[in-house]
Amino acid sequence: MQRSDKYEIISELARRRGFFWPSFEIYGGVSGFFTYGPLGAALKRRIEEKFRAFYIRPLGILEIESSVIMPAKVFEASGHLDHFKEPMVECSKCKRKFRADHMLQEQAGMTDVETEKLNLQELMNEIQKRNVHCPDCGGNFGNPEYFRAMFATTIGPYSEAVGYGRPEAAQSIFVEFKRLWEYTRERLPFGVVQIGHALRNEISPRQGLLRQREFAIMDVEFFFDPEEPECTKLKEVENEKLRLLLAEAKLRGEKEAIEVTVKEALSKGYIKTEWQAFFMVLAKLFLKEIGVPEDKQRFIEKLQWERAHYSTQSFDQEIYLDRWGWEEVSGHAYRTDYDLKHHMKFSGVDMQVFKEGRRFLPHVVEPSFGSDRLVYIVVEYAYQIRDKRAVLNFPRDLAPIQVGVYPLVSKDGLPEKAKEVFQMLVSKGFTAEFDESGSIGRRYARADEAGTPLGITIDYDTMQNETATIRDRDSWKQVRTEIKKLPELLQAYFRFEKNFEDLGRLIKG
């Protein structure tokens, strides 16, 4: 298998096995929209729930849910109406539109650093100088212009009541800050998360789940007193290492990240706030938990002209993908009091908090993850070939189907017994699948390709002594155990309290 083919192989597997595929295919499709099938929807839910369990609940972070459509005034205050735009060029021949900076990066080998700070005229100059043409028909590009990457609508029947689909989930948290502050009994620090859909009207999305027009996002806003910025959890992570590619190094043309401890990164001023460093460590550990090794991760600092308008310091957490190279999976921004200050100004509502005889606006650090990107990343890192067969080696707590139940043959009462075991497992809360189609080897292969960690086979011995065979997806080893013990054993296995070898008596595979 060649490197450049892995994305296509995974995309084909995802379509065939019901993970994800481009939406509206019967009408020719619309780029930037994807549909999740049964396995993909389950995988995405498990990733989001693991995020809650790993990243959210241990810190007591609050979760809210709010509207995807918001009035224009919100985004006027946040600065998105002024700043959320991308440079676009149109082919004079086929009329296709593309992002100007992406064309320079893809065809002329320029980098983000080189294209991000160019204005429209400078982009045009580079396009002409480097002989960049339409990738579809080879035509020339016209002059670049800015395109606002937000979906606009009207709220109700009045054309003047303009609304926008939110491009991030964060603004709802800032707009509702006063009520959330009251809910916390007016204590700092505290965090709020929103997990939900966002909309960005991308000019030419072409990277599958990595760049969509409608996507799921997990935004955490963590509020703290700027005069008491110390992270109470820092001691737990200060010796953890982070791989950083700093802004100054990028300007010098360096491409290799340095590895430093959190303690060193803070003492040398690489990271400006302790809470920011803490959440970056959590992001690294979370990605490791879902299957991405540390040496395939890095944090790249954004230059001043690359940062969002609200950010004083930003790092993108990037992971390495087979086709795309280094791609962002989460963003970490120090937003200071920018958002609360602007919403206070535009709404006329005082957003300040009172503490120890003074009034002030809290500062904010923001870790932000894309759920859809995580889905693709988990699938790519789980994908492997074993004996010419595809296996999705998901972490056991992410697998869409936990257990497959199979009668050895479709006769002699084995299917009925297998269905009985299947129903018992479902009633105990397991996500199980019953399969009696084809040979047992084919069923094992289908389960491996879907990432199912365990297969339970009902055979003739089952009818004699109420035992069953459990097969491991990763090692293909088998153990035998009593059926009545299955719920307890499987619960311990999926809580990582037992390994496969603990589930029964090892037998020949």
Image: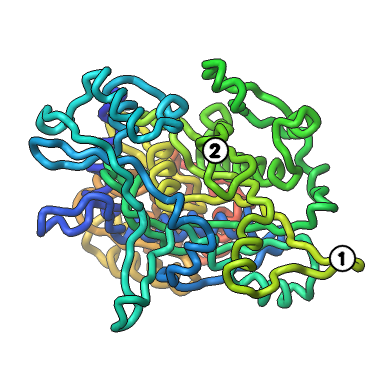
Disc tally is 2
Q: Quadrant of residue 456?
A: bottom left
- Looking at the image, residue 491 sits to the left or right of residue 36; the answer is right
- Looking at the image, residue 249 sits to the left or right of residue 393; the answer is right
Name the amino acid, label 2.
Gln
The quadrant of the picture occupied by the C terminus is top left
Q: Would you say residue 509 is visible in this rendering?
A: no
- Looking at the image, residue 71 sits to the left or right of residue 260; the answer is left
The image shows residue 429 at horizontal and vertical percentages of: 49, 70
* Mark 1, residue position: 358
Vertical placement of residue 69 versus 311, above or below: below
Task: First in sequence, mark 1 or 2: give its number.
Answer: 2
Q: Front-most of 283 and 19?
A: 283
> How far apart are the alpha carbons under marks 1 and 2?
36 Å
Q: Quadrant of residue 189?
A: bottom right
The image shows residue 42 at horizontal and vertical percentages of: 40, 60
* Mark 2, residue position: 317
Vertical placement of residue 107 versus 8, above or below: above
The quadrant of the picture occupied by the N terminus is top left
Q: Residues within 10 Å of mark 2 (few under 14, many from 20)?
A: many
- Residue name at image x 31 percent, y 26 percent: 104
Are the two marked residues, 1 and 2, in contact with CB atoms closer than 8 angstroms? no
Q: Residues within 10 Å of mark 1 (few under 14, many from 20)?
A: few
- Residue name at image x 74 percent, y 68 percent: 352
Q: Would you say residue 54 is visible in this rendering?
A: yes
Which mark's residue is nearer the viewer, 1 or 2? 1
Name the amino acid, label 1.
Arg
The image shows residue 274 at horizontal and vertical percentages of: 76, 43
